Image (spheres, grey):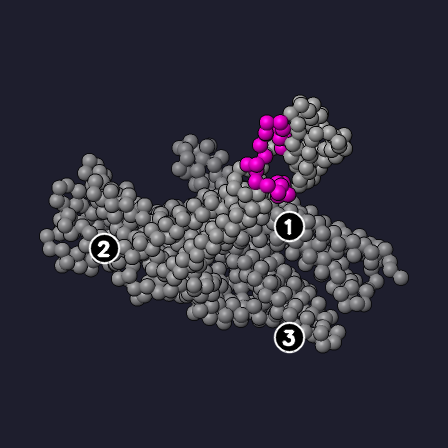
Amino acid sequence: MLSIGQILAFTAAALATFIAGAGSAKGVGIAGQTSAGVSTENPEVNSKLMVLQILPGTQGIYGFLIGVIILVNTGALGGDLKAVDLFQGLMLVAAVIPVAMVGFLSASHQGKVAAAGMLMVGQHPDMSGKAITMTVMVETYAVLALLASFLMVNAVKL
Amino acid sequence: MAILDMQRMDVLLMKRDQSALVKLLQQTGCVQLLPAQGTEAQVEEGIAQELAQVGEQLSRIRWAIGRLSRFDPVKQSMFKPLPQASRAQLEAEDLSAAMDTVSRLEQLEQQLGELRGEQTRFDQTGEQLRPWLQLGLPSGNLRATQFTRVFTGQAPTRGLNQLVEKWQGRPAIISLLGTERDTTYFYAVVHLSQADEFLDNLRAIGYQHAAPPPGEGTPQEQLEQAQRGSANVQQRMDRLLADMAQLGHQLHELRLAYEALNARQARLEAKAQMAHTGSVALMSGWVPKHTASALADEIGKRFPGTQVALRDPVEGEEPPVLLHNPALVRPYEAVVSGFALPAPDALDPTAVMMPFFACFFGMMVSDAGYGLMMALLVPLMIKIMQPSAAGRKIFWIIASGGLATVLWGALYNTWFGFGPWPTVFDPVNDSLPVMAVCIGLGALHLFTGLTLGAVQNIRRGDYLSAVFDQLSWAMLVIGLGLLALPQTAEFGKWLAIAGAAIVLVTAGRDKSNNPIKRLVSGLGALYGVTGWISDLLSYMRLFGMGLATGVIGMVINQLVGMLMGSGFIGMAIGAVVFVGAHLFNAAINILGAYVHACRLQYIEFFGKFYEEGGKPFKPLRLMPRYVRIQE
């Protein structure tokens, strides 16, 4: 018999993976479209654009990471589900908010910055280092959110 | 750790030596030419003409290489090193053989274009004939006679069928031909007396006039003729394409010719930059100091009658920047130049940055197994692929980062996601010590940056700035840090206050003489403390990225473990998943670690001291694109 706490824990894992992943999908998508456009004009910079396109993908990985940690902590991955009470379940849902929301926003914004950076690289291929730096700036907050979520998830002792 | 000193070289030479001198400079590859100024700077007509000619040949040969690239008999591959070429080949003067190949290709292309046009015409004829194929007589035979009129065209099928029924038994022959969708083509022969009525009837059902294309024989015969013609053209095109594919064997020669032309263009551009009179030219350029006098001697020896003058740069001149570091550090120059080169009189941070970069990189990849792979496989890849100088630098950064990764991976006890031994740091279950290490390393990094800033000021003799801008901040931040421990809190308090006081009083010293305005600027500068906090927090990414690698590795192993439990096929799939998933995890994390390690240098570290703005040193030299120079 499943408890509400266990269902909440699964909801938390699902939210972390799905919201952050959706953001990354959006970001990589935006960047990919621009990459295709810029490559048509200037095929030689394609490999430089590839790096920029991957960058907004990390937020999805962070979300997935938190989701998996929840599954590990609740024993779902081991096949032996632990008891989770209602409040622990709610704490887990609260804990995934940073990585899910910040992940979503920073990934879609990072996609836009990456796209703008690609236009820059298309014109000035030697500026790809700067374009990457600009794009990585957006990621800082996703990393902080990952840490916050991680600490909170680990604070829920099951 | 240095920016190479540059010297300005001026060479006054006889014009007849110009070409040979430029060639010598290109061979040595250590002079960046400066464009001449003033009235003598106008480009000589002969050179301008030659430049235009070379430019035209270059664009033709570039087109030819692109056109033939799919007939290349040698398969290109990322993992294959570029072919080698000798310097003599890259300086070849006689390129007529290659240009002949280009002309031949242009001819073939032109013939192909003509044939393509012919084929299109045949295809169009076939298209036009299609509705008339059932017409059993030549189109020329459909003519009005003394008593009949002929109608040809198309009309909606239903109306036409009704018309045929209606005109049964009347002096009209209506013959239906091919049908396309719901219109049918037809021809009709009608007695003159009924012709007008017939036409009215036709119009009523929506008739449109059309006639079979003129030509010899029935439409069917014409179509066969067109098809024969088209097949013939196709054969000729195939022959031309085969000839073109044959030319593919000349690709290597074409590429060599391209390199030679490119080198010639560079030499001509160098000549065009020289000031000149009727018989004398003046060449100016920057030379790295350590090679300057040897080069000057060489020029003097080879070209007697040439005057060479060397001098150090004077105030207001901005020599180009070339970094020079020991072999171990050199790859990391790519990280610095990826941001921006330092100003000519600033510090080259490469050597100081290197250990931090490798350490951070290792912390973020954080899997000793991946580290081993990088440290062992990447040098092997360099051996196989023989990448260009720039690519080689990146490869070596990853290889040396691999060593640091092995170290940190061992501390984290992560080997391909497994943790076989007791661990020093356990980021998943006991994360605080790891975070403390991250912040500690960050503080060390930032203070190193601050120290470099002080060194820069001291080197310029500006001791006060070193105290006001760097020492003050060190006191303030260290003082604030000491507040955290009860034993040192008292000392920390006064240290922080002293530091803050210096910042408050001196930060605005260049802005205004008004003491109140200075204090306001000082207050603004003190707000920079928040910047230090966010800089320090930024190093938490070392923990976050490392955690990501480790946990994903663990998840992969858990999934593979489940697969392994389910029989022989499961084991086979499991093995494939294990290799593929770990490769993916390694690749994405190496990329992430690289860009984040760069960012920590560019934003946090360089932000504390770096003075950018150097222009890269671009000497006249051979820069082949398709080949490697054989030394």
Disc 3 versus disc 1: distance between alpha carbons?
34 Å
Q: Position of residue B39 (x, y in %)?
A: 19, 35
Q: As drawn, which residue projects farthest toward the right?
A: A1
Q: Which amino acid lies under the numbered mark 3 shown in the image of this protein? A: Pro
B216 left or right of B82 in image: right
For badge 2, the amino acid type reads Lys
Both on one chain, marks 3 and 1?
Answer: no
Residue type indicated by callout 1: Ser
Between circles 2 and 3, the one closer to the viewer is: 2
Question: Residue sitting at 66 percent across and 53 percent down?
Answer: A60
The reply to whether callout 3 and callout 1 are in contact (CB within 8 Å) is no
Task: Answer with the quarter of the image where residue B396 lies.
Answer: bottom left
Rendering quarter of residue B148: top right
**Residue at (63% x, 45% y) in the render:** A108
Query: Residue B196 location in percent, x, y?
Result: 66, 22
Please name the residue that numbered disc 1 is placed on: A24
Residue B557: in magenta span: no
Quick check: can you spot residue B232?
Answer: yes
- Residue B475 at x, y percent in the picture: 48, 51
Task: Give the CA distance from mark 2 to mark 3.
Answer: 62 Å
Chain letter of the residue carrying label 1: A
Query: For residue B420, which numbered disc appears in the image?
Result: 3
Q: How many numbered dots are placed on residues in this image?
A: 3
Q: Give the range drawn in magenta.
A: B131-154
Residue B206 - label: none
Question: Mark 1 to mark 2: distance in Å?
Answer: 53 Å
Tell me the residue that label 2 is attached to: B23
Identity of the residue furthest to the left in this view: B305
